[in-house]
Image (spheres, rainbow, N blue to C red):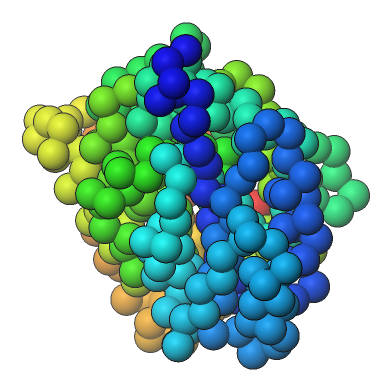
Amino acid sequence: MTSSESVASISVVLPCFNAAEFVESAVERLLGQAGPALEVVLVDDKSTDDTALIIARLAEAHSTVRAVLLPENGGVAAAREAAVAAASGDYIWFVDADDEWPDDAASALRDAAIAADADIVCAGATVVSEGQPERPVGNLPDGDLLTGAEGLDALLVGGITGHLWNKLFRRSLLGRIEFTRIRQHSDQAMVAQALVEADRVALLHRSVYTYKLRTGSIIRSGSRRADSLRELGEVMARCVARVDAAALRSPDYLYYRARYNTLSRLKDATSGAYSDTERRGLVKQVRSEMSFAQLGAIGRRGDVTRFGIYTLGWLSPRAYSVVLEKAGGRL
């Protein structure tokens, strides 16, 4: 290991909005991480509770904690961009205040980055919800190293997930991406853009993060996601085209469009969050984009469940909506 490698540092970015209940504990756990000391960058996205006061106090108490107080609420993507601009570490790790991570998560990510001279490290993670057993998030490809283009392809088919918190990013790489200002799914937009910019993507086949799924977050909550999903689809298309324009016709991209965009938009359109007129317009738009090519891409992946859901939604949105409601919005 060279001297420059031995001093590679991590800044942990923690965006906060009304996180007064969790942020102090999260910072304590981050400062207690094994290995080299971390810089912790806290961003308050104009909270309406005591979050700003708490993170300002934490910054005063700890030399390695920095507080960024935004003058207005701009959403999590804007908060993350402000934090990255304020960070000084060689690498960036994004976390959320109300989740959990093992004591050696940062050092494991850092060691993987150093060993591979990686621009991004993609690791495993788990998710836990009330009354349910912990389960893995995603299924990393085999091997230890990918190119950025290979990583983007893995993102399209779900091998690499669109979450930020189980990844480590070279800070200089994040300076070359857009922090897409969408209210939902900005994580996936960031991951895709970062993979396009990356030369080397290391895979760490162990869990470094536990996402805590709060009560009610997996049911049909009435969130209006149409605009975010549309913009995310545009970002993904641009990312794929930057690598290879011909890949926009590939089975992997068509599978992504079918699973993560078309079906997500149909689910959102029938969620009850819209007026009848809005719902009919959104459903009509989604169905106009459905195709046998997308359906065939789902079939090639052997994704029997989504093949059936896609077919039902295409043929009968009303029946699809009834089935989705009976399933509690979990399809």
Residue 244 left/right relative to 107:
left
Q: Does residue 266 appear anywhere in the picture?
A: no
* Residue lying farthest to the top in this orientation: 143
Number of numbered markers: 0
- At 85% from the left and 44% from the top, the residue drawn is 132
* Residue lying farthest to the right in this orientation: 131
Q: Is residue 46 above or below residue 284?
A: below
- At 36% from the left and 31% from the top, the residue drawn is 119
- At 9% from the left and 35% from the top, the residue drawn is 245
Q: Is residue 255 above or below residue 14?
A: above
Q: Is residue 211 above or below residue 97?
A: above
Horizontal and vertical percent position of residue 97: 69, 60
Horizontal and vertical percent position of residue 115: 47, 15
- Camera-side residue: 146 or 316? 146
Q: Quadrant of residue 287?
A: bottom left
Q: Is residue 55 above or below residue 264?
A: below
Q: Quadrant of residue 299?
A: top left
- At 63% from the left and 82% from the top, the residue drawn is 52
- Camera-side residue: 212 or 280? 212
- Camera-side residue: 72 or 140? 72
Residue 149 left/right relative to 120:
left
Horizontal and vertical percent position of residue 182: 37, 68
* Residue lying farthest to the left in this orientation: 245
Residue 49 left/right relative to 188:
right
Q: Does residue 119 appear anywhere in the picture?
A: yes
- Camera-side residue: 170 or 5? 5
Horizontal and vertical percent position of residue 104: 72, 31
